Image (tube, grey):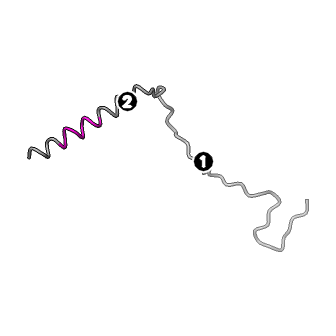
Amino acid sequence: MPVNTKTPFSSPKPFLPVISFKEENPYPQAKKVRQADRIAAYAKSTELVGSFLEGLKHS
């Protein structure tokens, strides 16, 4: 395959970046997140916000 030597950036092979731009999670999920887990987390967070607002109301 002839190489073009007229331009300084010519190359016989296509340029392939070394870094992958695809986002990947390096930490695998420990367990499958169930719908019940999401509901429990939502309930705990709303309870926390509710108690915080109650504390603001009484202060």
Disc number for residue 4: none
Residue 58 location, quadrant: top left
Magenta run includes residue 52: yes
Disc 1 crowd, CA 10 A, few/some/many (<14, 14-19, 20+): few
* Residue 36, x across and y down, in percent: 40, 25
Residue 9 location, quadrant: bottom right
19 w.r.t. 4: above or below: above
- Rounded to the nearest whole Å, what is the CA distance between mark 2 and mark 1? 30 Å
Residue 49 versus residue 1: which sits nearer the camera? 49
Label the magenta part by its dominant secondary structure. helix
- Looking at the image, tell me whether mark 2 or mark 1 is earlier in sequence order: 1
Disc 2 crowd, CA 10 A, few/some/many (<14, 14-19, 20+): few
Location of mark 2 (residue) = 39
Residue 53 placement, left or right of 20: left
Q: Nearer the viewer, mark 2 or mark 1?
A: 2
2 w.r.t. 42: above or below: below
Kind of residue indicated by mark 2: Ile
Quadrant location of the N terminus? bottom right
